[in-house]
């Protein structure tokens, strides 16, 4: 893996949030899927991990956002972690994966990745998280890759073109979207390898 992406380990992340502003709006869910490589150089989704997150103190939550994603942040049966605990647990798992695969750091893979990266970096800053494993601005965007490979930038439509099952009723769950994004990323990168684009 270390030789494939300039010593970066791709880690797929999806977040569900209380709005679009990473500085002010609540981070409500986060999920990761670590990407692995087999002995033939093909990529596969590896370990996944996800957390429901309690809104940080003073966080803004837009009603339109939670209506869209279908999350009640204050539901009494919602098992949620403090943001600091969730971020530190994610970072610890990613650092372990980076080390085990001989890479130097992680690079975030996401569907419209800049959105996810902004929320991860804002949460890390709020929590004063140490040893953030992610590159601070580089990322791999499956919306762009899906447009290139299949002419589709919407996750569900790109997955359909790639023959990846996608249940729209499960969408906007961070874990489900992360796992489908991981499937899409691996499918596109492996197809490029099949075509001779990387040996």
Image (tube, rainbow, N blue to C red):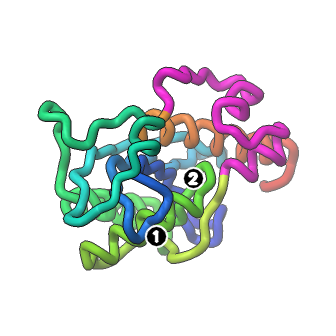
Q: Which residues are magenta?
A: 142-171
Q: Residues within 10 Å of mark 2 (few under 14, many from 20)?
A: many
Q: Point out the residue furthest to the front here.
A: 63
For residue 195, what is the image quadrant? Answer: top right
Q: Which residue is mark 2?
A: 110
Please name which of the two marks, 2 or 1, marks the residue nearer to the observer: 2
Q: Which mark is residue 195?
A: none
Q: Earlier in the sequence, mark 2 or mark 1?
A: 2
Q: Which quadrant, please, contains the N terminus?
A: bottom right
Res 141 seen here: yes
User: How many numbered markers are drawn?
Assistant: 2
Report how far apart the C-alphas of labels 2 and 1 lie in the structure.
13 Å
- Closer to us: 127 or 34: 127
Q: Vertically, is 114 above or below 136? A: above
| Element under disc 2 | strand
Q: Position of residue 142 (x, y in %)?
A: 67, 49
Residue at 49% across, 67% down: 118
Residue at 75% across, 52% down: 144
Q: Position of residue 99 (x, y in %)?
A: 39, 66
Q: Which mark is residue 134?
A: 1
Does 111 sit left or right of 148 as displayed? left
């Amino acid at each position: 893996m270390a030789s494939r992406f300039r010593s970066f380990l791709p880690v797929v992340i999806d977040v569900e949030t209380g709005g679009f502003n990473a500085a002010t709006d609540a981070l409500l869910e986060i999920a990761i899927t670590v990407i692995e490589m087999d002995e033939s150089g093909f990529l596969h989704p590896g370990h996944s991990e996800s957390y429901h997150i309690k809104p940080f103190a003073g966080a803004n939550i837009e009603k339109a956002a939670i209506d869209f994603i279908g999350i009640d942040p204050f539901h009494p049966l919602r098992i949620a972690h403090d943001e600091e605990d969730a971020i530190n647990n994610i970072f610890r798992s990613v650092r372990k994966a980076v080390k085990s695969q001989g890479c130097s750091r992680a690079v975030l893979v996401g569907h419209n990745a800049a959105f996810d990266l902004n929320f991860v970096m804002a949460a890390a800053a709020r929590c004063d998280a140490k040893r953030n494993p992610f590159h601070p601005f580089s990322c791999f965007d499956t919306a762009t890759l899906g447009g290139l490979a299949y002419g589709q930038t919407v996750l569900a439509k790109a997955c359909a073109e790639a023959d990846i099952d996608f249940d729209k009723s499960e969408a906007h769950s961070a874990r489900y979207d992360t796992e489908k994004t991981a499937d899409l990323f691996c499918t596109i990168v492996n197809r490029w390898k099949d075509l001779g684009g990387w040996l």
